[in-house]
Amino acid sequence: MTLARGERMLMRGNEAIGQAALDAGCRAYFGYPITPQNQIPDYMAAHMPEVGGVFLQAESEVAAINMVYGAAAAGVRTMTTSSSPGISLMQEGISYIAQSEVPCVIVNIMRGGSGLGNIAPAQSDYFQAVKGGGHGDYRTLVFAAWSVQELYDLTREAFDIADRYRSPVMVLGDALLGQMMEPIVLPEEVVDPDALPPKPWATDGAKGRPRRIVNSLYIEPLDLERMNRQLQARYDEAAEREVRCATEHLEDAKLALVAYGTAARVGISAIEQARAAGIPAGLFRPISLYPFPNRELARVAEQVDAILVAEMSLGQLVEDVRLAVDGSCPVHLYGRPGGVVPTPAEVVEQIERVMADTRG
Amino acid sequence: MTAEPLHHEVLISGFGGQGVVLAGRLLANAALAEGKEVVWAPSYGPEMRGGAVHCTVIVASQRIGSPEVSLADTLLIMDRASLDRFAKRVKPGGLFILNSSLVDARPDDDSCEVVGVAANEAAEELGNRRVANMVMLGAFLAKRPVLSLESVSAAMRAAVGKEHEQLAGVNDQALARGMELARGSSGGAG
């Protein structure tokens, strides 16, 4: 396939994720179909063979994540993608991957939940993504995109971050970001997987060298505690180096709207409308959801009169916002769960409500 | 004089086979070619051949915030069921282009401009019933020239490809016919 690299082109979010993985040197993709992310396995099935990699449609999400575990242990850049109920099925495997300290990329194109829910855009897997999701003392590093371009950029970078921290990295999108088409510019350079630094822990054949073991079993509590602390030390390092966030119109803002992904797209439209009506509102957009931009948000909280959290879930992001703000200003919630995308006008109403409360 | 920033939200709706999704993609590709900002989003779900289908396109001169079209500036309504479904999804003073071949009713909103175009008949007169979507696009471009006919035509030619080049002609005729019909339509509010 010839792509017009370096030029503006239209791409669907799901396709951009697939191309990002190929460009990052991902050579093993495993997945099981689920709406609204099926364009990703479709794209990988079409294009992974062109670069000599493995595309495999597994018999289930449980199988897919364990295939990712195996490929990751062998040192290959690997990815799986799914949507909310499918990601739930993968949690056991993600826990094993995290404790085994092997890198991989997992994409969740979120849909309405809980249960079978629906296939509309949602953000209700926030807790599952940032608090661990499976059993044990681990986290996944989580990044959330708000555009097709950013889905590409973050998915591609996720492979580097996964290798750096020997950790699963999750990229979050939603049904709308995955399905929609927007202009995107693909960079000219792509990663040659054979030119990546060697992985001295990978189980890629022990001929002529001592054997290596990839494992998450530590029978002795003191051994497991040491391993848990080792993971935590990596998360602490990520908190120093991998925090990403973006701000707009905050310089003179009295109200900060905190939102990520599609909710932040709606939010910036709302802020522009509010500003046109003379309300000084600004946007704080976390891009890394774990590690969360605590310090950056705490500084904003000292400068504004109030914070409004807009999320397509019912009070998940707001908990991390409250932890970061630590009481230094009031934090209000506008949550729309169930696959509902709020309109900018609805968010403007909430901004007006919070401004009225705050003045009162 | 600086022009007003462009931000136009279009919703196209019909049933599977009417070329609703393609019409939206052509607008999106034309917008890209003109260097404009654009978001195209399909309806998706448990869809089936012949079932309801719609898509949305936002064309703008500046960055697009919300990618979701809640209320459209223009609705291209290809069949009666689509009117029933989307009659309320319009901004005050917005535009309806109705495929009057299949839509025998009008939206209630008196603030809106309503243009009826017999797209199926026009397409059949041109000898290809499948170009009704192009007639509708032509009508849209005549009433709301947010994109040039040339860019939409170029996007269409790219979509039909070299092997079906003979189809480009009838599609161009359909675009032109749609423009004519919309300009000649009595239109007007209510």
Image (spheres, rainbow, N blue to C red):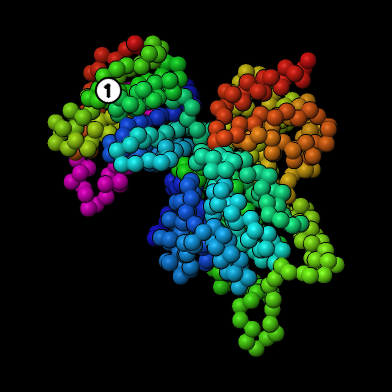
The percent coordinates of residue A238 (x first, y second) are 74, 55
- Dividing the picture into quadrants, the one containing residue B48 is top left
Q: Position of residue A123 (x, y in %)?
A: 61, 40
- Under circle 1, the secondary element is loop
Q: Please name the predominant secondary structure of the magenta segment in the image.
A: helix
Q: Is residue A182 above or below residue A73?
A: above
Tell me the magenta residue range. Answer: B143-169
Q: Residue at x 35, y 11 (%)?
A: B189
- Provide the chain ID for the residue under circle 1: B
What residue is pinned by disc 1?
B103
Viewer-side residue, B117 vs B171: B117
Tell me if residue B78 can be seen.
yes
Front residue of A114 and A112: A114
In the rendered view, does B148 fall on the left or right side of B186?
A: right
| Rendering coords of residue B83 (x, y %) | 35, 23
Q: Is residue A267 above or below residue A21?
A: above
> Type of residue at label 1?
Val
Q: Residue at x 18, y 28 (%)?
A: B121
Name the residue: 74% across, 38% down.
A319
Left or right: where does residue A316 sit relative to residue B81? right
> Is residue B161 a member of the stretch shown in magenta?
yes
Up-down relation of residue A27 to residue A278 (above or below): below
